[in-house]
Amino acid sequence: MNILVILAHPRVGSFNHGIAHGIAAALAEVGHRVTLRDLCAERFDPNFTDDELGRGNVAPPAIRDHADAVLAADGIVVVHPNWWGQPPAILKGWLDRVLRPGEAYRFGTNARGEGIVIGQLKARAALVVTTSNTPREAELERYGDPLDNLWKRCVWGFCGIDRVERINFEPVIGSSDQTRSTWLQQSTTRALALFPA
Ligand SMILES: Cc1cc2nc3c(=O)[nH]c(=O)nc-3n(C[C@H](O)[C@H](O)[C@H](O)COP(=O)(O)O)c2cc1C
């Protein structure tokens, strides 16, 4: 399978980097063709301009390259920290610019003539791995875990991916090397279960 791994964390050597590279290596090891795109390292431009909003616009080359990688993917993995209950801005801009109407999704009508969204991505599964510091109970009680809804329904569900799994590791702050090593193992295990050889 073609698996696209998207990483959004500015610090080389971060725990997020460890997760993304660990998953990419494990998936490649069992025979998948893995492409890892480190958005911060490649200085992805998240700024969605007026030109791109226009209907029938032609994507700039860097955006076309990412959009083609998404369209070619049989599976998608996203790794990012929770920043204000959201992905880092660079990844939000990636969603805005790369998941293009008419490619990743389109609008149509059902038998009753009602407007519907038709997801168009060929990928059948996605794994989202996030990290945060808020304890799980507090995250659920106070904030309702907005990242879960965002990724499962608003983004990948919208684009037609039925099977979307998410793992969140927390609290990263103060976590021991042993805990992080267990989390790394858990993330590769989940990736291999979702994308078996
Ligand atoms: C700008 C910013 C916003 C953050 N917002 C949250 C938040 O809303 N909830 C949370 O639990 N942690 C938040 N954090 C903590 C990060 O999620 C945490 O530092 C990160 O997941 C740790 O992974 P890393 O070591 O790979 O950076 C925030 C951190 C930054 C820098």
Image (cartoon, helix red, strand yellow):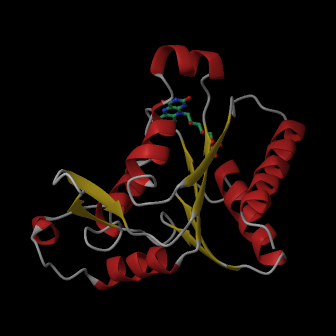
Locate the N terminus and report the quarter of the image it occupies. bottom right
Q: Foreground residue, 188 or 74?
A: 74
Asked if residue 135 can be seen in this view, the reply is no
188 sits left or right of 35 in the view:
right
Relative to 159, say whether 112 is above or below.
Answer: above
Residue at the image point whose x is 39% and y is 56% from the top: 90
Residue 124, by quadrant, is bottom right
Relative to 48, say whether 37 is above or below.
Answer: below
Q: How many marks?
A: 0
Residue 78, by quadrant, is bottom right
Relative to 172, say whether 47 is above or below.
Answer: below
98 sits left or right of 15 in the view:
left
Asked if residue 46 can be seen in this view, the reply is yes
Q: Residue 160 in the image: x percent, y percent? A: 43, 60
Q: Quadrant of ligand 1?
A: top right
Which residue is outermost to the right? 178
Residue 46, by quadrant, is bottom left
Q: Foreground residue, 146 or 152?
A: 152
Residue at the image point whose x is 63% and y is 16% from the top: 137
Relative to 133, say whether 56 is above or below.
Answer: below
Residue at the image point whose x is 48% and y is 15% from the top: 142
Q: Residue 52 in the image: x percent, y percent? A: 16, 70
110 sits left or right of 21 in the view:
left
Locate the C terminus and report the quarter of the image it occupies. bottom right
139 sits left or right of 87 in the view:
right
Which residue is outermost to the front? 111
Q: Residue 139 in the image: x percent, y percent? A: 55, 21
